[in-house]
Image: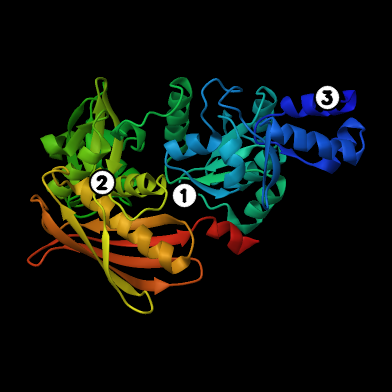
């Protein structure tokens, strides 16, 4: 191997995982001919240093986690906290676990934070367009929180720059905490996800607060009989104030005068598995609960978070017409236009005791199968709502119907139902889109 070739390969070996490599770029940076640069890339590819992908180009890859010591990629880290990749997923797959920067200050603070960190960096920020553009200028990947929308222009800039954009409904502080926990814990564990991984920041008031504080902070969140936690100075849950009571008393009334005692099913432990939480919410007909640990109240989690968890859990799996515990769906009928279809699934005593999480996963598998066949591509779930009229508790043969309510070039809205000849057990409406559809729409 010539000395020039060795020089280029050594240069490639010291690039950060996820960085793009090109013949022209190597030739200009290192002062070698394009022929030498081309041979170097091919040699590096044979050595497993880089990989070339259609439409993406050649990128430096992370070999078995050697650069991070953990083996966790940027894509795995983002998926582990329920974030969806909107741009350059192929690059995120090879980029190592990043240094995390919170973008909640000024652009100047962001630049200072970026300078203090080496390697690839992930900026976690909310609806801050100035921070969004500054992060991309600083060659940082983006994780948008609180449901912030990047918009077509930002996606185009990221696509051209070889940077990744992720999106999540979760708040920045919670996501930062979850990412740091995973960084310290090495590779994500396949064990059951817990409530603390999916909860939001707590919503609460103090016992000596007055009703006008409820109106100022929570009147937009709660209505009818929904309630907010009331805590003491040690963050211990003392009771709940429901919206109906809050709207019928004087704004100067102290919360301690009208709060109800805390109900046992109105809060859960942060260590509760998400599958168990889903079952509890469905059984109790609650739309949300408070989350606490040994120190007191530390979170809030609702049905929307449970739906995000189930959708994320399904998105992590490659498409297959199969639910959890080895339960296989059988396609029974499909109309000519593929607008509606019927499946059968047999739950036997050899599988597992039927649960709400099993039912949800079966419906999501049916939706994935139907959408895959209609769209002709792998799919992502965007949103969903679930309703369980009757609890399924007995083994037996059950049917699943899937019907297209609306179809566009970018998405499907499916209505699904799990039922038997005598009962309906679970219904849902799911929005499904082809993977990377949001990116392709804006190109």
Q: Is residue 155 left or right of residue 251?
A: right
Which of pointers 3 and 2 lies earlier in the amino acid sequence?
3
Closest to the observer: 393 or 327?
327
Closest to the observer: 353 or 348?
348
Residue identified by numbered label 1: 147
Secondary element under disc 2, as helix, strand or loop, is helix
Q: Quadrant of residue 22?
A: top right
Secondary element under disc 3, as helix, strand or loop, is helix
Return the mark for residue 326: 2
Secondary element under disc 1, as helix, strand or loop, is loop
CA separation, marks 3 and 2? 50 Å
Q: Nearer the viewer, mark 1 or mark 3?
A: 3
Q: Is residue 243 above or below residue 4?
A: below
Residue 207: image x %, image y %? 22, 31
User: What's the residue at 10%, 51% (across, down)?
Assistant: 395
Q: Quadrant of residue 273?
A: top left
Closest to the observer: 197 or 395?
395
Return the mark for residue 6: 3
Does the rendering let one see residue 154? yes
């Amino acid at each position: 191997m010539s000395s020039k070739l060795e020089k280029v390969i050594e240069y490639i070996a010291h690039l950060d995982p996820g960085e793009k490599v090109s013949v022209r770029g190597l030739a200009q940076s290192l002062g070698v001919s394009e022929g030498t640069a081309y041979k170097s890339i091919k040699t590096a590819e044979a050595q497993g240093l880089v990989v070339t992908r259609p439409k993406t180009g050649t990128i430096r890859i992370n070999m078995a986690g050697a650069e991070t010591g953990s083996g966790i990629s940027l894509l795995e880290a983002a998926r582990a906290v329920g974030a969806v990749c909107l741009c350059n997923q192929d690059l995120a797959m090879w980029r190592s676990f990043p240094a995390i920067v919170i973008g909640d200050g000024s652009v100047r603070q962001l630049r200072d934070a970026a300078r203090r960190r080496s390697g690839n960096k992930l900026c976690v920020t909310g609806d801050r367009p100035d921070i969004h553009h500054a992060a991309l200028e600083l060659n940082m990947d983006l994780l948008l929180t609180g449901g912030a929308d990047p918009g077509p222009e930002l996606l185009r800039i990221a696509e051209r720059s070889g940077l990744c954009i992720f999106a999540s409904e979760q708040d920045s502080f919670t996501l930062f905490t979850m990412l740091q926990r995973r960084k310290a814990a090495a590779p994500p564990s396949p064990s059951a996800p817990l409530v603390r991984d999916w909860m939001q920041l707590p919503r609460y008031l103090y016992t000596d607060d007055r009703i006008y504080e409820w109106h100022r902070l929570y009147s937009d969140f709660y209505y009818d009989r929904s309630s907010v936690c009331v805590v003491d100075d040690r963050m211990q849950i003392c009771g709940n104030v429901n919206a109906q009571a809050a709207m019928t008393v004087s704004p100067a009334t102290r919360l301690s005068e009208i709060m109800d005692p805390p109900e046992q099913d109105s809060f859960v432990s942060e260590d509760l598995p998400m599958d168990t939480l889903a079952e509890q919410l469905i059984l109790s007909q609650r739309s949300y609960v408070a989350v606490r640990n040994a120190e007191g109240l530390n979170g809030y989690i609702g049905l929307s978070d449970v739906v995000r968890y189930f959708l994320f859990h399904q998105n992590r799996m490659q498409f297959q017409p199969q639910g959890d515990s080895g339960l296989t769906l059988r396609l029974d009928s499909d109309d000519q236009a593929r607008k509606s279809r019927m499946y059968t699934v047999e739950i036997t005593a050899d599988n597992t005791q039927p649960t709400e999480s099993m039912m949800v996963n079966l419906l999501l598998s049916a939706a994935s199968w139907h959408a895959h066949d209609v769209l002709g591509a792998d799919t992502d779930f965007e949103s969903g709502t679930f309703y369980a009229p009757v609890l399924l508790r007995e083994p037996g043969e059950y049917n699943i119907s899937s019907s297209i309510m609306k179809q566009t070039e970018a998405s499907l809205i499916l209505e699904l139902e799990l039922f038997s000849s005598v009962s309906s057990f679970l219904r849902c409406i799911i929005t499904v889109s082809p993977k990377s559809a949001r990116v392709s729409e804006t190109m």
